[in-house]
Image: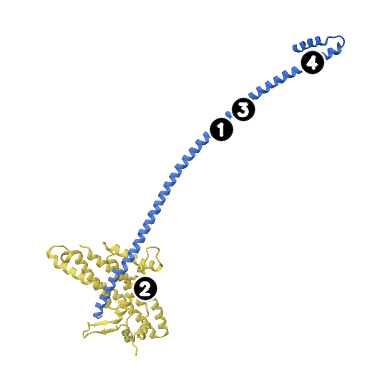
């Protein structure tokens, strides 16, 4: 155990090593680590922000969905009403049309009946005249009889 | 003729180079060379890793260095209250890395290394463990001691420190000044002594035990076997001592510097 110059040379070396670490080793590593810490903190904050905005978006989506649903219900109700109205209108129109058709048909039928009656009357008249002609073939003033028969036909 | 005395003597003699007439002007070339080499290797490794350090995803090598960094940083933070990044923490890292590497030289088998040094450097005596040389541990402890005194004066002022020397820990009464001062002198002297001798004693004793176990080989085959088994056991236990002593030396460094920052 002899103390000698080695002590001072080692102390000198030690001083240089401390200086080197203080100056060149510690700061860059500290900076790298602190930068990473900051980066991670920012990342976490961003994730938090993202989650928050997602929540907000989901809230908004819920509101919009409710709105859309109520609007859809409104539209459906309105259209159902409108459809009912259209059907009612159509029914109304159909009824009117049907009545019109029925009236028309009745009128036509009446006209036809009148016509048929007329024709029948004429036919009956003709047949009567023909019958009378055949019965009274002889001395009959055809003209006077015809007039008589015509009178009769009109009465029929 | 190889005797136990000459064997141990051979291993415990420094490679000393006298630079003057008095025994003080001697340099232990082995301690100095290995210590400086290990310092350059250790800090150089840190420097290269740190220079390419990224704040993004770190490489495995960077992660390893960051592990050491965080370890030292956490230890310092628990003891020192102030801006540790300016001086205390880097110093602690230096001490830890350097002392750990110097202690680790103890893992290398003494006799093989002795042969190696002899072939490589053509020297007969060469001790490869710088911390088993009291000069090295005193150099470290005294440097820290002077740093401690520097901070004592820098933080409290010269007057503040002198006041502390005379008025603590017992009280400010003039009758207690001498007692206080004696107490503080004992503390001041004991700090570097315990700091350096703890490390030196552990490493020196470890080395001697390796040598004693090595001497088993002189007793024949059975002795050689015992020497191997016991040497392996001691080497495994020594892993703990090497790391623990480096850690203790670093912690004391931090504690001493932290104490210099705190006034009583």
Left or right: B68, with B194 as reference point:
right
Q: Foreground mark, 3 or 1?
A: 3
Q: Give the farthest residue toward the left.
A: B174
Of labels 4 and 1, earlier in sequence is 1
Q: Position of residue B228 (x, y in %)?
A: 40, 80
- Element under disc 3: helix
- Element under disc 1: helix
Q: Quadrant of residue A148?
A: top right
Q: Foreground mark, 2 or 3?
A: 3
Residue at position x 27%, y 69% from top? B253
State which chain disc 4 sits on. Answer: A
- Answer whether labels 3 and 4 touch (C-beta < 8 Å): no
- Answer whether labels 2 and 4 touch (C-beta < 8 Å): no
Question: Dot 3, crowdedness within 10 Å: few (<14), some or many (≥20)?
Answer: few
The answer to whether residue B71 of the structure is visible from this angle is no
Circle number at residue B239: 2
Judging by the rendered image, the residue that carries numbered circle 3 is A94
Q: Position of residue B57 (x, y in %)?
A: 40, 63
Q: How is the image coloured?
A: by chain
Judging by the rendered image, the residue that carries numbered circle 4 is A124
Q: CA distance from mark 4 to mark 1?
A: 58 Å
Q: Using the rendered image, report if marks 3 and 1 lie on a common chain.
A: yes
């Amino acid at each position: 155990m002899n103390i000698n110059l080695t002590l001072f040379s080692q102390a000198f070396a030690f001083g240089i090593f401390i200086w080197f670490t203080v100056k060149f080793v510690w700061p860059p590593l500290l900076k790298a680590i602190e930068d990473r810490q900051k980066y991670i903190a920012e990342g976490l904050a961003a994730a938090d922000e993202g989650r928050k905005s997602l929540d907000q978006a989901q809230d908004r989506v819920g509101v919009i969905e409710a709105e859309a649903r109520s609007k859809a219900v409104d539209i459906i109700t309105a259209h159902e009403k409108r459809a009912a109205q259209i059907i009612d209108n159509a029914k109304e129109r159909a009824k009117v049309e049907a009545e019109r058709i029925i009236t028309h048909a009745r009128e036509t039928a009446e006209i036809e009946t009148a016509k048929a009656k007329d024709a029948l009357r004429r036919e009956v008249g003709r047949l009567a005249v023909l019958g009378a002609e055949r019965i009274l073939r002889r001395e009959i003033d055809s003209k006077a009889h015809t007039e008589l028969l015509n009178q009769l036909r009109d009465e029929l | 003729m190889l005797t136990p005395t000459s064997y141990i003597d051979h291993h415990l003699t420094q490679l000393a180079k006298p630079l003057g007439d008095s025994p003080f002007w001697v340099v232990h070339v082995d301690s100095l060379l290995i210590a400086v080499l290990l310092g350059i290797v250790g800090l150089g490794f840190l420097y290269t890793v740190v220079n390419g350090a990224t704040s993004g995803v770190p490489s495995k090598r960077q992660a390893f260095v960051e592990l050491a960094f965080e370890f030292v940083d956490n230890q310092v933070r628990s003891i020192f209250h102030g801006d540790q990044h300016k001086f205390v923490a880097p110093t602690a890292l230096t001490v830890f890395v350097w002392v750990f590497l110097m202690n680790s030289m103890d893992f290398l088998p003494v006799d093989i290394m002795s042969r190696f040094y002899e072939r490589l450097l053509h020297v007969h005596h060469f001790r490869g463990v710088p911390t088993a040389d009291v000069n090295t541990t005193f150099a470290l402890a005294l440097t820290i001691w002077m740093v401690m005194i520097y901070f004592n004066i820098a933080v409290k002022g010269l007057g503040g420190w002198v006041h502390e020397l005379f008025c603590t820990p017992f009280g400010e009464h003039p009758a207690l000044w001498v007692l206080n001062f004696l107490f503080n002198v004992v503390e001041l002297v004991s700090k570097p002594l315990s700091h350096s001798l703890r490390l030196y004693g552990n490493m020196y004793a470890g080395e001697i035990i390796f040598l004693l176990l090595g001497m088993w080989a002189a007793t024949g085959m059975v002795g050689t076997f015992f020497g191997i088994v016991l040497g392996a056991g001691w080497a495994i236990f020594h892993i703990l001592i090497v790391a623990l002593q480096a850690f203790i030396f670093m912690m004391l460094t931090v504690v001493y510097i932290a104490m210099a920052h705190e006034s009583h």
